[in-house]
């Protein structure tokens, strides 16, 4: 995403076209988005897709996204700790999955 200042741009000033943000880690061919979940302060975001999803940490007032985790199936997602941790639950399985970072994954029995 770029910010265009027409007068400065056409006067060949260096601030005529400024990079405001980038889309990182975009993968083409991903499944359709079912819904989005975010933390109350907007620093964490989850994208729940038909076949899995991603957690993202939001930086620089939404101009930079950093992928914090992925999952293969979830119907319910809670985003915690600014996107650094997530809790997911699928409608069918009998467990809840919690993820605190890419390498810390734990599965807990689903309460009856």
Image (spheres, rainbow, N blue to C red):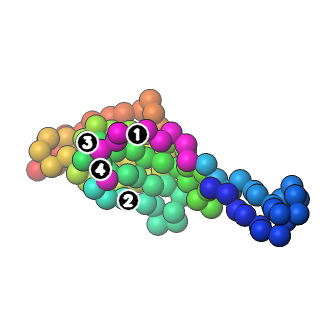
Residue 32 image position (x, y, % from top left):
29, 50
Between circles 3 and 1, the one closer to the viewer is 1
Examine the rendered structure and indicate whether residue 78 appears above or below residue 29.
below
Q: Magenta segment: does it hold 73?
A: no
Magenta residues?
A: 23-33
The image quarter in which residue 71 lies: top left
Disc 4 and disc 2: Cα gap in Å?
Answer: 15 Å
Which residue occupies the foreground of this view, 31 or 48?
Answer: 31
For the point 11% across and 45% down, which residue is it? Answer: 92
Mark 4 residue element: loop
Callout 3 crowding tier (Cα within 10 Å): few <14, some 14–19, many ≥20: some
Disc 4 and disc 3: Cα gap in Å?
Answer: 8 Å
Left or right: where does residue 80 sit relative to residue 17?
left
Q: Which residue is mark 2?
A: 37
Callout 1 crowding tier (Cα within 10 Å): few <14, some 14–19, many ≥20: few
Dot 2 or dot 3: first in sequence order is 2
Examine the rendered structure and indicate whether residue 8 appears above or below residue 110.
below
Q: Which residue is mark 4?
A: 32
Q: Which residue is mark 3?
A: 51
């Amino acid at each position: 995403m770029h910010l265009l200042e027409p007068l400065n741009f056409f006067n060949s000033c260096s601030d005529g076209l400024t990079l405001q943000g980038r889309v990182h880690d975009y993968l083409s061919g991903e499944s359709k988005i079912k819904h989005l979940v975010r933390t109350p302060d907007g620093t964490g975001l989850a994208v729940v897709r038909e076949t899995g999803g991603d957690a993202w940490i939001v930086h620089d007032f939404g101009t930079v996204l950093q992928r914090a985790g992925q999952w293969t199936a979830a119907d319910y997602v809670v985003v915690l700790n600014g996107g650094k941790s997530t809790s997911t639950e699928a409608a069918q399985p009998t467990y809840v999955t919690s993820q605190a970072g890419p390498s810390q994954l734990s599965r807990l029995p689903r309460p009856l």
